[in-house]
Image: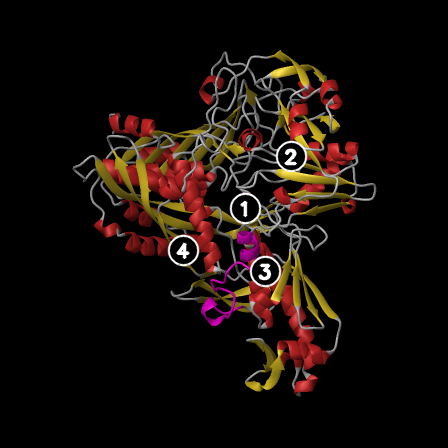
Amino acid sequence: MSDRTVLTGIVGDTLQPIARNVPAEEPPELPPNAELRVIGKPVNRVDAVPKVTGQARYTYDVRLPGMLYARIVSSTVPHARIKSIDTSAAEAYPGVKAVHILDRVMSIAQLRDPSVEANERYPLVRYNGQPIAAVAAVSMRAAKAAAKLVRIEYERLPHVTSLEAAMRDDAPIVFPGPTEQAATAGGGGATPGLPQKGNLRGPARGGPRGDLQKGFAEADHILEREYRTQVQTHTPMETHGLVADWRDEELTLYASTQYTLSVRDDAASVFGLPKDKIRVISEYTGGGFGAKFGIGNYGALAIHLSRKARAPVRLVLDRREEHVSVGNRPSSIQRVKLGAKRDGSVTALHVESYGTGGAAAGAGVGFCHSAMYPIPNVTTEHYDVFTDAGPCAAFRAPGQVQGIFALEQVLDEMAHAIGMDPLALREKIDTNDTDDARARKAERRIGAQRAGWSQRRPPGADAGPVKRGIGMAQSQWVYIVHGGTTTCEVRIRGDGSVIALCGAQDIGTGTRTVMAQTVAEELGLQVENIDTRIGDTRYPPGPASGGSRVTGSITPAARNAAHLAARDLAARVAPSLGAKPDEIVFRDGRVFVRGRPDRGTTFVEAVRKANFDEIVHRADRREDYEGYRAKFGELHISRHGIGGVQFAQIAVDTETGVVKVERVVAVHDCGRPINPKLIESQIYGGVIQGVSYALYEERHLDPGTGVQLNANIDQYKIVGARETPAIEVHLIEQLGGQSSTDARGVAEPANVATTAAVANAFYNATGKRIRTLPMTPANVLAALRAEERS
Ligand code: MOS
């Protein structure tokens, strides 16, 4: 370790030199982006052409010789014991090569009830659409036909599909015994070992900080409000899918996944295989928002079928299965009590929340209440409510989207109650002495100016039926660093070509591109000169694409490896240039002596002269220079965060109840921005997904059967091009002195604030509050009719 002085702060404001204890092997600190050549530049994605020409091979596109097609047999009832399963007709169907019945339900945040299931031959059915078995056949048509021939005899049990009904004393019980958490936490991070009564599990307490009673006693104004959010299902462009190829010597899995290593590790544990016998390949993944981890039920089925049939098996979910069975953002009811003084200081916050993640735990509402503002007295109490519905899973800023919808709206309500500008209220209370708070302060200033906040009119100012308004909300997320090893390898070949390798996948965010930029910067090359190879567990281990952690985890490893390769090459070429190795500079495709650009040669020529076959260097992403605030398995939580501020301008048609989001100004921080074009693209996506959640998306279950009535992308409305607002992104460049690139993520904060900003704009437009999502015409008209309480 060595003490170094690094610059921190927001570029363009003042940068402060701060001492950091940096491992001696770390490359020198990078200057601000303006002084760099490739990092910080809006270069095109390195794989843009294969993507838009259809050459990119997604799991969906994988075709192997002799490959079979599989279809899942799912439950047709919402709650039952399975008495018998007869697969004989399916097995006899022409072209069928294997049938498999699940002997256990894979986790995906599923809860298990050991007291019941220990005695059962088959897993209990806990929602309509739960996978039970699968059939593999020579064609998709045969697999579909045969799947319909599997006969399942059920003993029906009483069921309940809605949160409200599940909370009643006489409600059917989803998990009769105490539940144990099987694996991955779902939406809000399920807490193990909580009390359980009926379908309620909890409370999970957050905070608690200070003295609530005292805090409310000090308040001049107290607001008590209830906010409701709906279940949002996962709708990535590519559905979940796996192609399993079981051979005697190795199991190869092609996976549409957010984490190649989780697929390998799940398969190893379920099938009792050594990890080194499993290879996972994920060249391209068509989106993933929190539910594409591990093998899932569908993956376990595909692997079983491949083993039985001795052939590769492709199991790609259809859109219905995607909506129903792989996870969703849980719903919430949030009862919020907020106390503030006349000057806007907030004295106390109490939140009691209920959420249903169906047959899974983890429906919490995030950590914003105690973490965003320094509120002196805070307590949150959350209950998971079990229902006979598809399980929740993580979904882009799990819990936080729901929590901020309520928190940022109740603050807006408080601002109006005490006659204060909502932005001024944030200035009053967002006073943590952290670089997150300083970033938000800068973001509020930029956003207010760009969004025209000073021209904002009083609530309900438009006379006609269409009313316009603007609103703002803040975003907050943690800066997560991948805590398993993240390693990159850089090879310089004798012909001057450069290869960068990492096993991590790309869910669409641009993993290859940020790696290529980082390596190119270090070697004085351009992204086209770097051949990046990712998405294969044979490459060095990479991070999960979850928790907004790829860029912040992978680019330091890539830079560290490229730095070692550059220093190695420098040592080889220095003698021929009559210089010392540490005088050698790599820039603009050339290798030369510092201060003497004429004393040098091209990169390719330098490599050829050095006369080697290949230089290979590997390096890891080391810990944050300041260490971490907390570590949970592979989640290492930085002392710093990420966030942003968004301003929405909307129009509400008060006759039809149709809301149109016209414009969103999104101002965000992500440490050092590696590629502004990719970051803007992610923020566009976050805003679009936020608008979609605010206005349209909602799972509808039929209470009688538990069937999802809109499990398609026709009736499950998602925002389209016509409903997409004009989105204006502004990034700040913030240096934290934490790693060799100082990059952080942006994916999750990009969609956290949007819904709350739209809701606050609704109030500014109409003078009425909308506290129930989504803002469908029915919910809008009900909100417009409601009598306001004060
Ligand atoms: Mo996610 S919810 O960051 O996979």
Q: How far apart are marks 1 and 3 (CA)?
A: 18 Å
Rendered residue at 36%/34% (across/down):
214
Residue extent of the magenta highlight? 30-53
User: Residue 295 location in percent, x, y?
Assistant: 66, 37
Q: Which of marks 1 and 2 is nearer the N terminus?
A: 2
Mark nearer the viewer, 1 or 2: 2
User: Residue 502 location in percent, x, y?
Assistant: 66, 56
Q: Distance between the residues labelled 4 and 1?
A: 20 Å
Estimate how packed mark 2 is, as few (under 14), some (14 to 19) or many (20 or more) residues with alpha carbons within 10 Å: many
Query: What is the secondary structure assignment of the residue under circle 3?
Result: helix
Q: Which of marks 3 and 4 is nearer the N terminus?
A: 4
| Pointer 4 with pointer 1, Cβ within 8 A | no
Amino acid residing under circle 1: Gly
What residue would you read off at disc 4?
A: 439
Residue 547 is labelled as 1
Residue 296 is labelled as 2
What residue would you read off at disc 3?
A: 515
